[in-house]
Amino acid sequence: MSDYRIHGETGEWEVVVGLEVHAQVTSNAKLFSGASTTFGAEPNTQVSLVDAALPGMLPVPNRECIRQAVRTGMAIGAQINAWSRFDRKNYFYADLPQGYQISQLYHPIVGEGSITVLTDEKDESSAKTIGVERIHVEQDAGKLMHDQHPTMSYVDLNRSGVALMEIVSKPDMRSPGEAGAYVRKLRAILRYVGSCDGNMEEGSMRADVNVSVRKPGGELGTRTETKNVNSVRFVMAVIESEAKRQVEVLESGGAIAQETRLYDPDKNVTRTLRSKEDAHDYRYFPDPDLLPLELDEAFLTECRESLPELPDAKRKRFEGLGITPYNASVLTAEVETAHWFDALLDAGAPAVQGANWMTSELFGALNKRGETLATTGISPAEAAELLTLVADGTISGSLSKQVFEIMLETGDAPSRIVEERGLKQTSDTGEIDARIDEILAANADKVLQYKDGKEALFGFFVGQTMKAMAGKANPGVVNERLRAKLAG
């Protein structure tokens, strides 16, 4: 994916991408007030006096928000700054009651780290490490609603003051695919850590997409920033359409303006929003109402020890159990999937068979039924019981599919289904021999062909025997008895 190029009239162009991801911190209260952060509440019902910026109201940092930012930094191997400071970013907007946003510009809480992505999930050699420049903590603004009244815009301040982590990548991405892989991986890490729910539809994770183009290996071009992109698909679409637009502008003799743009998903184009401001335009200065943040060793130790097993470590552990790299990456892509599979292993399921079954049979059935792991009635313990019945020879692989269908429909345990419906596999050689003798007698011509060297017919005899025994014969015994009889 790193050899992605745009082919213009004057030759090839390279795309350079950096992302600023705003992730809403998982906490019950806002960054500097005790107001609730629950999504979907009636407008202006979750606004404290601090959020409304009434005179004399002072911000108090929420320890949990700081903790989650530190844990996120640790999860990407970043420098944690024991001393950091809040700044005021001054600008006027109707949804910003203070007239400034409390943010961190000069001394962020988290410094440099990195995220490794696979640009091709099936190929471990496609790994690429993307640098993260910083993570800082800031408060969100409110929301303007333009569709509530014919001539006026309404303001909802429920979101005002909600804690955000701004995760700023280095300009290390060179294609829409790399950027998509980065956002997916970052989202997975945030969800494993529990510091953000990653719900892009609800706006709790959104990306500002910085794009520039240059001749391969040349000087960096002027970048544009497309704001508030709220899905992986749209991030990739923005890069593609904006890079093509820039190439067209440059090739027709124009210049790229450093500006902020908005993405229109219906037309798949970006549009100018405003010319890009620099830091000095915001008149940043240290917030006089907040002391610098000083993190002690005990706090940092608690943050470090609270981290779960992260996606890369989990994937390596799964691969160590003999699971294919592709299945391991599928099973670790979403935190719910990884936890479900771990519960399946804990309940005694064989690892490789469990991984194969989950990625094909289970996901296939859930997709067909429009269900998810969270909504299905099948528990990891019941799934492990089903896989154990196959592993110990109680039922065959083909019968297990039938049992699984019944489990999905009835919610019954697999052992009960097998017992009540008489689905146990038989290893009774007397019964198997009798069926084999009937099939060989009825297909004497094929027996002769087999003995003349047409060995592919062996599969035919196995199939006929299994059919005659309604799938209940132990395949190992069937193979063994057939070979003996055909050899004799």
Image (cartoon, helix red, strand yellow):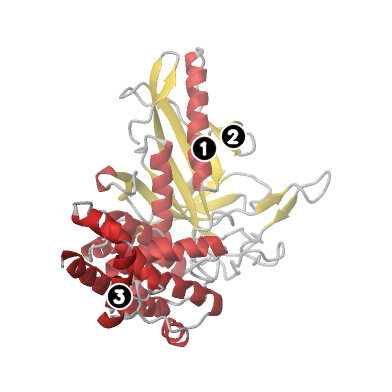
Number of other residues with Cα within 10 Å of mark 3, as a class: few under 14, some 14 to 19, many 20 or more: many
Give the numbered dot on residue 474. Answer: 3
Name the spot of residue 273 as percent of width and height, x first: 61, 34
Number of other residues with Cα within 10 Å of mark 1, as a class: few under 14, some 14 to 19, many 20 or more: many
Q: Is residue 179 left or right of residue 438?
A: right
Give the numbered dot on residue 268. Answer: 2
Instruction: Name the residue at 41% across, 73% down.
Output: 470
Number of other residues with Cα within 10 Å of mark 2, as a class: few under 14, some 14 to 19, many 20 or more: few
Observer able to see residue 287: no
Provide the residue designation for mark 1: 237
Answer with the quarter of the image where residue 218 lies: top left
Q: Quadrant of the C terminus?
A: bottom left
Q: CA distance from mark 1 to mark 3?
A: 53 Å
Name the spot of residue 374 as percent of width and height, x first: 51, 70
* SS class, disc 3: loop
Q: Nearer the viewer, residue 140 or 278?
A: 140
Q: CA distance from mark 2 to mark 1?
A: 7 Å
Instruction: Name the residue at 28% across, 43% down.
Output: 126
